[in-house]
Amino acid sequence: MGGLRLERRDAAGLGEIRQQLLDVYAEIYADRLSEDFHSTARFDERLGWNAEVPGFAAVVGYLDDTPVGYAYGCTLQETTRWWNGLLTPVPDGAITETGARTFALSELMVTEKLRGTGVARQIHDELLRDRPEERVTLLVERNHPRVRALYESWGYEWFGEALPFPDAPVYDALILRRGIG
């Protein structure tokens, strides 16, 4: 999309964009903010947890000076709890993390007016550009099959079902193997 500006941030730069991320989140999840799990406060808490993990990175997309979407994540560490809610049996070693194996894409969102324009893919690709991890994982709510299909069209594969928090919805865990590392 013409005019889209992408800006990268690491954990040290999160303070510069944190309120923008919260504002976009509140716009996208406006109809679900009354749910404890989807409240802005809980989202901000999860954002903070991600920023504390090595390998944190974020990309924000702007049209003019208005944030229209973003993605962020971090490198899964050996002690990660990311896989604790996995409901599906997986092969031995499939969820063993080394602190360098897997990048967890925690959020990717784009404002409604720009969905279907390719902005999400541009933000996604910029976030993953030059990442050293051999694979990427993300979670998609089970009741969003179109979103899952979009990620699958980008090369992600279904890995299992997950319940990351007791009050969270059930998610599909997806993996993108990058052929590096």
Image (spheres, rainbow, N blue to C red):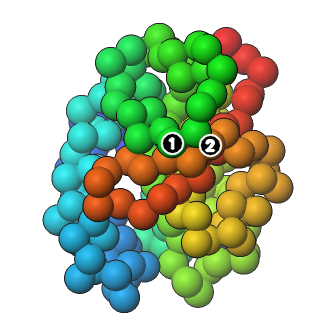
> Residue 93's spot in the image, x, y percent?
59, 13
Taking the image as drawn, is residue 35 in sight?
A: yes
> Residue 58's spot in the image, x, y percent?
43, 46
Determine the secondary structure under disc 2.
Answer: strand
Q: Nearer the viewer, residue 106 or 19?
A: 106
Q: Is residue 85 above or below residue 66?
A: above
Q: Which mark is residue 87?
A: 1
The numbered mark, 2 or 1, whose residue comes first in the sequence reads 1
Taking the image as drawn, is residue 61 in sight?
A: no
> Residue 120's spot in the image, x, y percent?
63, 63
CB within 8 Å, label 2 to label 1: yes
Disc 2 versus disc 1: distance between alpha carbons?
Answer: 7 Å
Determine the residue positioned at 36% across, 71% down: 25
Q: Is residue 153 left or right of residue 53?
A: right
Q: Amino acid at mark 1?
A: Leu
Determine the residue positioned at 43% across, 26% down: 76
Q: Quadrant of the C terminus?
A: top right
Q: Is residue 24 left or right of residue 123?
A: left
Label 2 crowd (10 A; few <14 / some 14-19 / many >=20):
some
Label 1 crowd (10 A; few <14 / some 14-19 / many >=20):
some
> Residue 167's spot in the image, x, y percent?
29, 61
Q: Nearer the viewer, residue 39 or 120?
A: 39
Q: Is residue 97 above or below residue 27?
A: above
Q: Which residue is mark 2?
A: 160
